[in-house]
Image (spheres, rainbow, N blue to C red):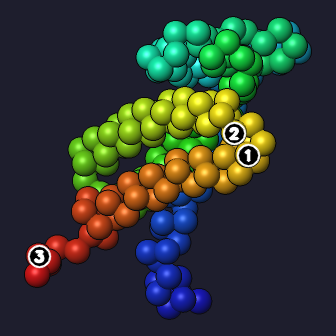
Amino acid sequence: MKNTIQQYKPFLLFLGKFAFTYLLLTFMYQSYLGQFDVKKAETDGFTKIVASQTEFLLQLVDDNSYTMPHLQEPSVKLIYHGKYIARIVEGCNAVSVMILFIAFVVAFTGKLKNTILFILFGLIVIHILNIFRIALLSIALYHFPKSEHLLHGVVFPLFIYGVVFFLWVIWVNKYSSYASTTPSK
């Protein structure tokens, strides 16, 4: 048994750090969300920020774009070109993606400074790309409303998860403690 544990120690450490970080951050985020009353259609502050920044971006394309609170549910209505296109709910703010990103980076720990800087860099990239994702999705839904399932369920999730995967590859190969120390040829 001791040999088996020793043999799989790197994997078990990875799994333990990932699970601990993921569960801790998820618990913290759920505690944050618990402050908002869903029955009163209260939307969390971060989702409102995402909606506001998406509105700003869309107004660069069409000045008849705006957001407004949804009165029946905890979300923000997104109006593009004068038409109600979508609602931005808590799941659209990419926090769950950010938590997953952080847990993976922490699980493949590198030097503390590099880890913190890469996490901050990654969170900024994910946030900015998420704003662009929502804005582009809104424009696409305006022009292709019958393609909602394909756009919202396939194309745009692939976009955001693809970027996160690319960031993970960079982290593991360049900055984590598992990165090769041999110079590439």
Q: Which residue is mark 2?
A: 144
Residue 143, located in which quarter of the rendered image? Answer: top right
Q: CA distance from mark 3 to mark 2?
A: 48 Å
Which kind of residue does numbered mark 2 sit on? Phe
Kindly tell me whether residue 132 is visible in this rendering: yes
Amino acid carrying label 3: it is Pro
The alpha-carbon separation of the residues under discs 3 and 1 comes to 47 Å
Q: In which quadrant is the C terminus drawn?
A: bottom left
The structure residue drawn at horizontal position 28% and vertical position 41%, both measured from the top left corner, is 117
Dot 3 corresponds to which residue?
A: 183
Picture quadrant where residue 69 is located: top right
Q: Residue at x 17, y 73 (%)?
A: 181
Q: Name the quarter where the N terminus is drawn.
A: bottom right
Q: Position of residue 91 (x, y in %)?
A: 68, 35
Residue at point 45% right, 52% down? 163
The spot of residue 161 in percent (x, y) is 54, 53
Q: Marks 1/2: CA distance?
A: 6 Å
Q: Is residue 155 above or below residue 116?
A: below
Q: For mark 1, what is the residue?
A: 147
Residue that appears at 23% across and 74% down: 180
Residue 18 — which label? none
**Mark toward the viewer: 3 or 1:** 1
Could you tell me which secondary element the residue under label 3 belongs to?
loop
Residue 44, given in percent of the width and then of the height, sits at: 66, 18
Residue 71 vs 146, above or below: the answer is above
Q: Nearer the viewer, residue 176 or 141?
A: 141
Q: At label 1, which amino acid type do we have? A: Ser
Label pair 1/2, CB-CB below 8 angstroms = yes
